[in-house]
Image (cartoon, rainbow, N blue to C red):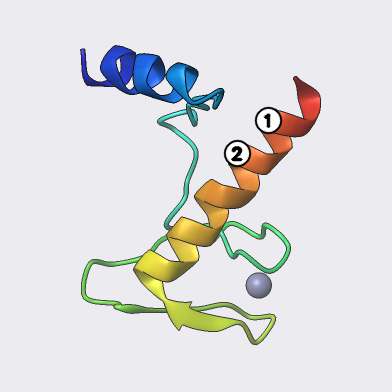
Amino acid sequence: MFTSFLQDKLAEQGKKLIKIDKWFPTLKTCSCYGKVRKSLSLSERIFRCKCGFESDRDVNAAINIKQEGMKRLAVV
Ligand SMILES: [Zn+2]
C-alpha cells in the first residue's frame, strides 16, 4: 500500500523506486567492502569492523542500503 503510493509519487517526478531484499543484512554488513559480521547486538550502537571501519550502526546501515540501491540501478 505504502510502496505503491510511493511508486506513483516518484513516477510523477520521473524517479524510480528500488526495493531492497528484506533479508539483506544492512545492519551487519560493513559498508567498507561488504564484509558481513556474524552478529550485532542491539546494545552495540557503534558498528566496528575488523578492517578498521567505525560508524554509528544506523549510518552504516544507511550506507549499505544506498550502495545496494546503486547496484540494482546499475543492473536495470
Ligand atoms: Zn570492514
Q: Quadrant of residue 47 in the image?
A: bottom left
Could you tell me the amino acid type at mark 2? Gly
Could you tell me the amino acid type at mark 1? Arg
Q: Looking at the rendering, in which quadrant would you find the C terminus?
A: top right
The percent position of residue 22, horizontal first and vertical second, equals 40, 30
Q: Which mark is residue 20?
A: none
Q: Can I make out residue 32 in this image? A: yes
Residue at x-position 33% and y-position 23% = 6
Q: Quadrant of residue 16 in the image?
A: top right
Residue in front for this viewpoint, 13 or 19:
13
Image height check: is 36 above or below 75?
below
Q: Can I make out residue 28 in this image? A: no
Residue at x-position 78% and y-position 25% = 75
The percent position of residue 56, horizontal first and vertical second, equals 39, 78
Residue in front for this viewpoint, 65 or 47:
65
Q: Could you tell me how many numbered marks the image carries?
A: 2
Relative to 10, 76 lies left or right = right
Image height check: is 53 above or below 75?
below
Residue at x-position 31% and y-position 12% = 4
The percent position of residue 49, horizontal first and vertical second, equals 58, 77
How busy is the neighbourhood of tag 1: few (under 14 within 10 Å), some, or many (20 plus)?
Answer: few
Q: Are marks 2 and 1 in contact (CB under 8 Å)?
A: yes
Distance from disc 2 to disc 1, alpha carbons, whole Å, reads: 5 Å
Q: Which residue is mark 2?
A: 69
Q: What secondary structure is marked by label 1?
A: helix
Q: Looking at the rendering, in which quadrant would you find the N terminus?
A: top left
Q: Which residue is mark 1?
A: 72
Image quarter for ligand 1 equals bottom right
Q: Under 8 Å from ligand 1: the CB of mark 1?
A: no
Residue that extends furthest to the front in the rendered view of this protein: 13
